[in-house]
Amino acid sequence: MPSDATKADLRASLEEERASLRAQLAELGFGEDGGLDYDQNFADSSQVTAERGEAEALAKSLQETLSEVEHALAKFEENTYGTCESCGQPIAPARLEAKPAARFCIDCASRR
Ligand SMILES: [Zn+2]
């Protein structure tokens, strides 16, 4: 289990990541409401459609990362951060430092 100081650092970096992901989503037009902010007049242009497809794919991956980050932050509230969600064993601090949003220990992750 990571020390409290390490956990505080990990939490801070998760909060930073969450803020940056939200900013990137907002920039793409995917704000808090999740809606797209495109001008409907250009909706039939194939170029815009292609760009929109790319933006949606990027936004989708950002949203997935964001939900992982939010999930990890929720685990701080439940005091289960740093515990594997599969076997309940502590996740190695080195793994958490490499991937603060990790949900599983290295053994369970490699088995999945
Ligand atoms: Zn595990």
Image: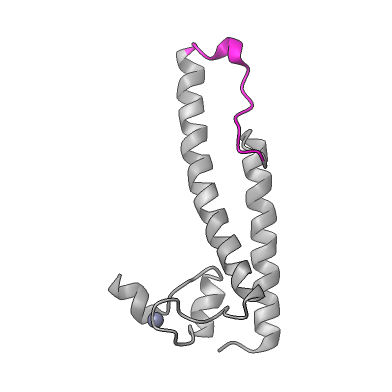
Q: Position of residue 70 (x, y in %)?
A: 60, 61
87 is within the stretch colored magenta: no
Left or right: 17 as drawn, with respect to 101: right
The one nearer the camera, 24 or 70, is: 70
Q: Give the residue furthest to the left.
A: 111
- Dividing the image into four equal quarters, which quarter contains ligand 1? bottom left
Which residue appears at 49% of the width and 12% of the height? 45
Q: Is 51 rendered above or below residue 9?
A: above
The answer to which image quadrant residue 93 occupies is bottom right
> Which of these two is toward me, 88 or 92?
88
* Image quarter hosting the N terminus: bottom right
Q: Residue at x 62, y 80 (%)?
A: 79
Q: Nearer the viewer, residue 105 or 13?
A: 105
In this rendering, the answer to whether 49 lies above or below 3 is above
How many marks are shown on the rendered structure?
0
Residue 92: x %, y % from top left = 49, 85
Q: Split into 4 quadrants, where in the image is the C terminus?
A: bottom left
Q: Quadrant of residue 19?
A: bottom right
Where does the image place residue 100, in percent across and percent down from the top left?
Answer: 56, 71
Q: Residue at x 54, y 68 (%)?
A: 101
Colour scheme: one colour
| 27 over 6 or under it: above or below | above
Residue depicted at 50% across the width and 41% down the height: 58
User: What type of secondary structure mainly makes up the magenta span?
Assistant: loop
Magenta residue span? 33-45
Give the x, y percent position of residue 23: 69, 45
Please say whether residue 42 is one of the residues in the magenta stretch: yes
